[in-house]
Image (cartoon, rainbow, N blue to C red):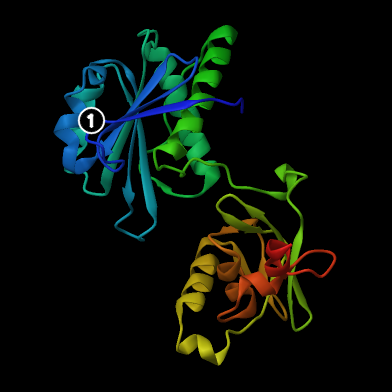
Amino acid sequence: MATATIKIFLAHSDPKRLRTAELSNWTGKAVAGPRSEFDDVIAREESSNSGIYFLTGVDPDNGSPAIYIGVAESIKDRVKNHLEKDFWNHIIFFISKDENLTRAHILYCEGRLIEIAKSAGRATVMNNQGSGSKLPESDRADMEIFLEKMLQLLPALGVELLVPAVSSSNQNSQNELLTCEIKGLKATGYLTPNGIVVLKGSQAVLKPRESSNKYPWSSILRDKLVESGNLQTSEDCMLFVKDTEFSSPSAAAAVIHGGQANGLTAWKNRYNKSLKQLEAD
């Protein structure tokens, strides 16, 4: 993505409340706010425009993050219908300041964004596949640029659910490969802005340590990874069958070791230097 300057306006001086966001040299604009300020959000002049909106919260069935992606020719009229849904607690919508988004444009964006959200795998997508829309080649190119700008702004507004899952195929060459070893088993990964990615093919101990009974969070995390299909039982170990992102090196090391572990000492580079040593250098 191209570099950009983000301008965020805090309507009530609180970054958790109503705010707007814009990017330099872009005609789009975002409005975001908590559900508790829904009336203020849709009272904004921008909500009368056509655009794309996101409702985020927690899936009541499994406790995982959840997102609904929709479009409307009048944002405020459409989103009122979602008040009967209880999963969401935050809303963001995007419009074009030059009012140049047609119905075909927003339907195209809806289809692409649902694809991106499902591919990222960070949240339950609460709506079905969008209808999408076929556009002329030039319009598709314009909308892909619009989508890119939206994806730049969403994390700045607290929504990282569409950030693509990081994999070895798109690993930045500047990200040094790290290893975590225990009992002849080996896991590989690399640091990311969100934590650390453990790569497909990495190994973890078959059975958790006894200490995990006292501190069960690592076992709970392992169970979730098994349930999601990221971690599977092999002959003599657990095997990562998908690239898997963790919030910290210690969380990843705990799953690999089967109990509490210090990620700063467990993860090492090819010169056998731990993360702790690397940070001290």
Q: With respect to residue 29, does 65 lie above or below?
A: below
Task: Name the one closer to the observer, 135 or 44.
Answer: 44
Q: Is residue 95 left or right of residue 183?
A: left
Q: Is residue 63 visible?
A: yes
Where is residue 225 shown, x and y percent of the image?
54, 66
Identify the residue at image location x=51%, y=12%: 135
Residue pictured at 55% horizontal, 14% vertical: 140
SS of the residue under disc 1: helix
- Identified by mark 1, the residue type is Val
**Which residue appears at 51% of the width and 85% of the height?**
212
Quadrant into which the C terminus falls: bottom right
Residue positioned most to the right? 271
Occupied quadrant, residue 76: top left
Residue linked to disc 1? 79
Vertical placement of residue 80 versus 275, above or below: above
When asked about the image quadrant of residue 77, the answer is top left
Q: Relative to 252, is 207 above or below?
A: below
